[in-house]
Amino acid sequence: DRPGAAAIDPARRLVRTERRQISGDYLIVALGAEGRVEAVPGLAEGGHNLYDLDGVLGLRQALASFNEGRVAVTVASLPFKCPGAPYEAAMLIEASLRQRGLRERARVDIYTPEPFPMPVAGKALGEAVKALVASKGIDFHPQHRLQAVEPGRRELVFENGERASYDLLVAIPPHRCPPVVKESGLVGEAGWVPVDRGTLQTAHAGVYALGDVTAIKLPVGLMLPKAGVFAHHEAEAVAHNIAAEITGRGAPKAFEGHGY
């Protein structure tokens, strides 16, 4: 097993593990976002975590024995990784119920704090996704931020004061920056690492952050989604610019936020 980072010192471009410390001329922080089911009371006991292997395996078993009732696919809070995941999951579950001849005995609902699906992609796409899930008989409930789950009553409690019952809960938990990154002092007010939008450099020279751990504001005023496609292109830009700086060859390359 390779030990993970126990501490990050961005001023010295140094990483400490349980066994040693590693320093360099450049430091790239790409530790992702962590799901925290414990941030919502009752969520761990009452739901299946869609972003966790054990949670998904438990969901598979629960779906196999599910015969009727309400399935709730719930986004606990924003931001979350892979903006399309709750809609994909709801439609996959709906298709499975239909294939098993249970669709007429089941209801599928999506609850999310978003005003419409994937807002950063624009209202037209969001309305198209809404129409798609509606065509499958899936009910969409926007602007519902999860406050608590009451497993004994099988109820969801939302910050807007509404409640909803469920028989099977599929949840995307709140996302947080990894503690080791937060303790490094790199994290900003939004709870993520602020970086230059084009270079991905942090406030420290030679220290970069990319992927889900970052907070990047787009020209439209919304934040860049947390998705692998963006991390991929960010990594290409950072690697190119570091190589160009070391070798003195090649023009700088900016991350342009492409992905959708």
Image (cartoon, rainbow, N blue to C red):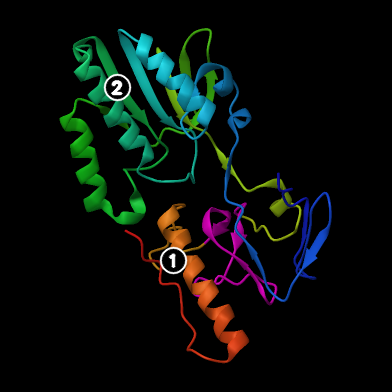
Q: What residue do we see at 82% from left, 49% from top? A: 18
Q: What residue do we see at 48% from left, 66% from top? A: 234
The residue sitting at the front extreme is 1
Residue 142 visible in this rendered orientation of the protein: no
Verify whether residue 12 appears in magenta: no
Indicate the position of residue 134 as horizontal and vertical percent values.
19, 31
Three-letter amino acid code of the residue under disc 2 = Val
- Residue topped by disc 2: 108
Three-letter amino acid code of the residue under disc 1 = His
Category of crowding for the residue at label 2, using alpha-carbon neighbours closer than 10 angstroms: few (below 14), some (14–19), many (at least 20): many
Residue 257 vertical placement versus 17 (above, below): below
Which numbered disc flags the more N-terminal residue, 1 or 2? 2
Residue 90 visible in this rendered orientation of the protein: yes
Q: Is residue 62 left or right of residue 87?
A: right
Mark 2 falls on what kind of element? strand
Q: Where does the magenta region start and end?
A: 190-215
Q: Are marks 1 and 2 in contact (CB under 8 Å)?
A: no
Q: Is residue 190 left or right of residue 205?
A: left
Split into 4 quadrants, where in the image is the N terminus? top right
- Residue topped by disc 1: 233
Which of the 4 image quadrants contains residue 62? top left
Indicate the position of residue 203 as horizontal and vertical percent values.
67, 72
The disc at residue 47 is none
Verify whether residue 196 appears in magenta: yes
Indicate the position of residue 153 as horizontal and vertical percent values.
49, 8
Category of crowding for the residue at label 1, using alpha-carbon neighbours closer than 10 angstroms: few (below 14), some (14–19), many (at least 20): some
The residue sitting at the left extreme is 135
Mark 1 falls on what kind of element? helix
Indicate the position of residue 174 as horizontal and vertical percent values.
55, 37
